[in-house]
Image (spheres, helix red, strand yellow):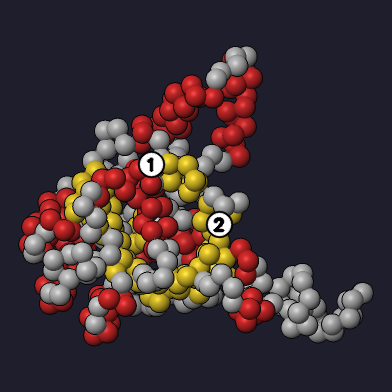
Amino acid sequence: MAGNKPRGSSFSRNFSAASNTISQIPGLKHGPNGTMFLSSGIPDLDKILGGGFTLGSLVMVMEDPEAPHHMLLIRNFMSQGLVHKQPLLYASPAKDPRGFLGTLPSPMLSKDEKSRDRDAEQEKGLRIAWQYKKYFGEQNSELQRDGKSEYCNDFDLRKPLERHFYSGQQIDCISLQDSADLTTFHDRCSSFLSQTPRNDRNITCAGRIAIQSLGAPQCDFSDKECDMLSFIRSLKSTIRSSNAVAVITFPPSLVSPAFSKRLQHLADTLVSVKAIPDEDKELAKLLTGYQDMVGLLSVHKVARINTQVPTILEATTFSMKLRKRRSLILECLNQAPVDGSTGSSYASSSSCSGSSKTGAIDF
């Protein structure tokens, strides 16, 4: 009967036809209110933000003057794009920005992929010298990319990205020292974004822009704050009409407070990173797992596109840790036990009865 068929609102979009196409594109997935997400390259950060970076958004990262922890976010963001064969534009104050590509981390194999590799090696029955294994690794990676790829990978920060990820890729590296003004830089960004025009029903690819340390003293335009603001506004409007995400880091300590506030206001998603002192006894007493932390990440703003409802996070500050000194993970801050004893965190140590005595739980 026709009455059994649910009626949809005249204002709702039908993404059933486009969802099948987008699901086949690596590194993209649907979000609420017709938005689409692009992976940040950090699985925990994607979960915190509700799925990743919103396609067509501007992400700002506030740097810490004492440690380059923002480079961890930039590296994972760029590596994830290269793994998914997405166009990449990278700009930095360095003289040779292309040399930074050699520091990008390599994706780690999942448990299923490791078991597959072991079975394949056993079937071959060959003992291959370690220096020749990389050639077989390239073939295995190609086969994995032809199949279903992961939305977000874990990256090994100690292992550089293999060469075959760069082959046939569209990578544009720009030195901010060569840009006396921002006009040339803006034209190159616009030309890059014109290759991924906005089309929700027929998305073939998504682009990534990574700009490191905008406003650093190495840039000739570091004292032209009005020009940099105009550049950010224009870049943001261009990104809105394209299938791309731009991640920009800037040093708040090297710019004026008014300029820093305006940059924070222009950001769709705003995060900051902060280093942790090696020996802070007071902080070590307050937080569990302090010895494993390398820094803190705070989420100040989450992109709101196609909605007026703000995103409410369970927590806004997270600890940055290196799992086995390899992959970057983010965890909620846990308060240390009040009595100073070691063990579980304060939040997980409370019982239903509220009693601190050990033994059976009284209901």
Instruction: From this view, report whether residue 169 is shown above or below residue 220.
Output: above
**Given the current orientation, which residue lies at the most extreme front position?**
279
**Given the current orientation, which residue lies at the most extreme top position?**
125
* Residue 333 pos. (x, y %): 59, 73
Residue placed under numbered mark 1 in the picture: 83
Which residue appears at 23% of the width and 41% of the height? Answer: 170
Question: Based on the displayed image, in which of its 4 quarters is residue 115 positioned?
Answer: top right
Pick the quarter of the image with the N terminus.
bottom left
Q: Indicate the amino acid at tag 2.
A: Leu
* Residue 318 pos. (x, y %): 52, 70
Q: Which of 104 and 186 is in front in this view?
A: 104
Query: What number is the disc on residue 72?
Result: none
Label 1 element class: helix
Which residue appears at 36% of the width and 32% of the height? Answer: 164
Label 2 element class: strand
Q: How crowded is mark 2: few (under 14 residues within 10 Å), some or many (20 or more)?
A: some
Q: How far apart are marks 2 and 1 (CA)?
A: 21 Å
Which residue appears at 59% of the width and 77% of the height? Answer: 280
* Residue 329 pos. (x, y %): 54, 59
Pick the quarter of the image with the C terminus.
bottom right
Residue placed under numbered mark 2 in the picture: 322
Q: Indicate the amino acid at tag 1.
A: Val
Instruction: From this view, report whether residue 46 is shown above or below residue 140.
Output: below
Question: Based on the displayed image, in which of its 4 quarters is residue 198 positioned?
Answer: bottom left
- Looking at marks 2 and 1 on the same chain, the residue that comes earlier in the sequence is marked by 1
Q: Which of 343 and 180 is in front in this view?
A: 180
Q: Which of 123 and 31 is in front in this view?
A: 123
